[in-house]
Image (cartoon, rainbow, N blue to C red):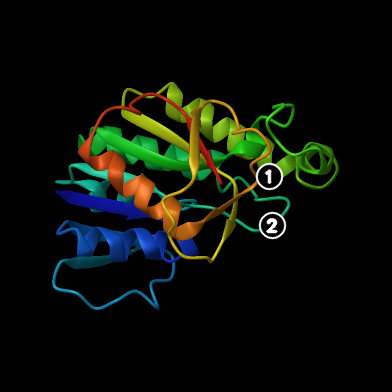
Amino acid sequence: MKLIVFGASGGTGRLVVSGALDRGHRVTAVARRLDGLPAHPGLTLHSADVLGEGRPLQAAALGHDAAISAIGSTARNPGGIYSRGGQAVVTALEDAGVPRLIVVSSGGVRPRDPGLPWWFRLAIPVFLRELYRDMGVMEDIVRSSGLDWTLVRAGYLTDGPATGTFRAEDGRNPSGGSRLSRADLAGFLLDQLDGSSWSRRTPTLTY
């Protein structure tokens, strides 16, 4: 499969790229800065900003079978990286004829989800309101697209190893779950390339 990865230089994006190469996929990595990505004969590097002009994204997407978007921000106010960046990715894929999109989101998008730990439900409106509002807009953009999408809501991401022991529920946080390793998230994202069980659904992953 020929896969394009947006946000390829981030913590999750790098694991997606390396995991996809290990599985034998041909990968195009897209990010503003591409340092730190491995040299590999199956990897093409494409420097582009999802908040910039859309034409370079469309050109990068041409000829691919699927896309994974791991774009994100650690800032409380993400400056539209999710909403504007998500729209740019969706538009580029639709214009390039790429049918499949798998997107990283977060369980914090539903701050009143009873499955979230109580302290997280309290923290979201105080500290993280803008972050998750922007992420929610991105989710709406993806759902309204003509793509075959999956929105993967992850718990708080850690740098731990892959365990395969996470829980996944559709559209709601597994009860009391709050954490997930990037390695387990990356593996789940790549697994979605080989099946349709989570097509047009919103799996939420935590331990």
| Residue at image location 21% in from the left, 67% down from the top | 43
| SS assignment at label 2 | loop
Residue 19, disc: none
Task: Check disc 1: other Cα within 10 Å, few if <14, some if 14-19, many if 20+.
Answer: many
Residue 131, disc: 1
Q: Amino acid at mark 1?
A: Leu
- The Cα–Cα distance between marks 1 and 2, rounded to whole angstroms, is 8 Å
Marks 1 and 2 in Cβ contact (< 8 Å): yes
In this view of the protein, which residue sits in the foreground, 201 or 54? 201
Q: Position of residue 132 (x, y in %)?
A: 67, 39
Does residue 165 sit above or below 115 in this rendering?
A: below
The answer, for residue 157, to whether it is visible in the render is yes
Q: Position of residue 205 (x, y in %)?
A: 51, 41
| Residue at image location 41% in from the left, 59% down from the top | 13
The answer, for residue 49, to whether it is visible in the render is no
Q: Amino acid at mark 2?
A: Ala
Does residue 181 sit above or below 110 in this rendering?
A: below
| Residue at image location 23% in from the left, 34% down from the top | 195
Q: Where does label 2 land, which residue?
A: 75
Q: Is residue 96 left or right of residue 154?
A: left
Q: Position of residue 152 (x, y in %)?
A: 46, 38
Q: Is residue 115 left or right of residue 145?
A: right
Q: Is residue 169 left or right of residue 5?
A: right
Q: Position of residue 190 (x, y in %)?
A: 30, 48
Mark closer to the chain start, 1 or 2: 2
State the image quarter where residue 114 is shown: top right
State the image quarter where residue 7 is shown: bottom left
| SS assignment at label 1 | helix
In this view of the protein, which residue sits in the foreground, 39 or 180? 180
Q: Is residue 189 left or right of residue 41?
A: right
